[in-house]
Amino acid sequence: MKPALTSAQVAQLEADAEQRGTAIAELMENAGSALAAAALGRAAPEGRFVVVCGQGNNGGDGLVAARKLAQARRSVAVVVIGEPGKLKGEPRRNLERLRAAGVAAAATLEVTPAAGDAVIDALFGTGLNRAPQGQYAEAIERISGWRKTGATVISADLPSGLHTDTGRAFSPCVQADATISFGQLKLGQVLEPGASLCGQLEQADIGLPAPSGVLSDPAAFLLEESDARERVPIRAADSHKGEYGHVLLIAGSFGKTGAAALAGLAALRAGVGLASVAIRPQAMTAVMSHAAELMGIPLSGEGALRLADLDVLVGAAEGKRSLVIGPGIAVGDETSALLGALLRRCDLPCVLDADGLNAVRGELELLRQARAPLLLTPHPGEMARLLRRSTAEIQADRIAAVRALASGTNAVAVLKGARTLIGLPDGTVYVNPTGNPGMATAGTGDVLSGVCGALLAQGLAPADAAICGVFAHGLAGDLVSQRTGRAGLIASDLLAGLQEVWVRWRR
């Protein structure tokens, strides 16, 4: 996994580098050199270069890149927004070195790049916290226009207009073809829409220290495939189904039997030895018909889950290794009280999803009182109801939201969506890079809950089950979409995709 830093953490690393004797001049020289190399590798053999700089250190990086391109005998036009004469410190020194190399910097955008040319966006770095205005906004709009005519855009550290800590795009914001991250990754580069706006993301070592032992804030990491693969339980040659656990799914209701079936089948495809579904009798036949391997536990009566179901569910949990609660259940006046009582009496690790989360109705104390470890898997709407915020507020700062739920419940929280997040109670967050828009369809969340429940039943801790399950779930969707496309991908397609993942990860 790779660290992904906030703007404050980047400033910490830069200060630490200076204390260790690495001057800002050296960092800027290294950053500009990396930027120039990336631009040279992407422009046509006879392509020209346009470098658009701001007034800060990001602009200084661009000026170094322009000097390096000039030294490579390439045609370079340089624009400094806000007038070259206003530059200070290292950016001003690099402007003077650029002039000494025979390249003048203009204050206005009078160039017109074409196909085969490269534009270096060095307007804003990690410090931007509001929408670009005036000349800066105009410059970003011009860069966007040049890209539409065929020029390649390379951003220095971050596309200008992108918020470092949230991945939120101010208006306007550069859409880059490539972004060169100086040192460690930044959160804005790995969260959407920032990840898409960065284009091809590359890291360049510019001399900053490793973040370990330097950063004081909670850590965030971008997951890599090896992080998930190494957590897959290894199956011994002489093992039997009992060793891979039995998951109890409290799922499904009349009209929503598909949710229970998808979660149960996903648990089986994720390697659990046995899967049982607790459900009302009138809905059981429909669930069982989806797969002969699923077993059913009837809950007497009809309608929403209520306190009268408690003893049956506690009994059903005996001998099981994990619980999955929520996919497709009917919620009534007593469902919240039932879940609270069940979680206080049952010591099995539990995935709580969908209507299981909606039944909580924002009463996080109910989850804090749980006897066993919890893995919560809300989508943004469910997260909004849990935290009693709007969905727009959740999406505006997904990192803050997943941290709030994890710390507020002492549980592992998974905030689903583009770049699904995994939050731990100590503030650590993992960003998942797998998955695609084709998975934005009914039932894919039920598949994820089944996968995570299966991994819990096989002995993984909630954090490990979330990392392995979320990555595998997204990768399954990616592998399927490569064959079928994204439009029309349905949740049951992920079951076959999971099999492809396990083949790919065979150990």
Image (spheres, rainbow, N blue to C red):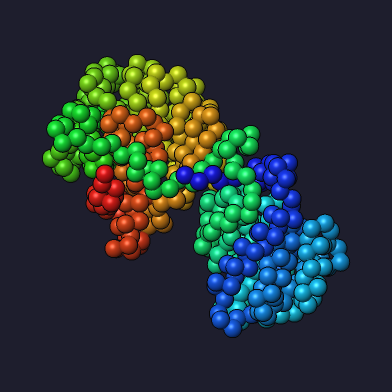
* Residue occupying image coordinates x 51% and y 62%: 200
Image side of residue 31 versus residue 429, left or right: right
Q: Nearer the viewer, residue 170 or 210?
A: 210
Extreme residue in the front direction: 21
Horizontal and vertical percent position of residue 350:
35, 28
Left or right: 92, with 218 as reference point: right
Image check: 27 left or right of 280?
Answer: right
- Front residue (pair 252, 152): 152
Position of 274 relative to 81 (above/below): above
For image coordinates 34% across by 19% down, the residue present is 347
Give the quadrant of the C terminus: top left
Nearest the viewer among 232 and 370 is 232
Count how many numbered circles sit on residues in the image: 0
Residue 414 in view, yes or no: yes
* Residue 29 vertical position relative to residue 2 in the rendered view, above or below: below
Residue 37 in the figure: left or right of residue 110 = left
Residue 447 image point, x, y percent: 31, 43
User: Which residue is at 55% across, 64% downward?
Assistant: 178
Q: Percent from the top left, x then y, of residue 423?
A: 49, 36
Counting from the top left corner in percent of width and height, residue 497 is at 27, 52
- Which residue occupies the extreme bottom position in the image? 46
Q: Which residue is rendered at x = 25% and y = 37% of the image? A: 234
Residue 279 visible (yes or no)? no
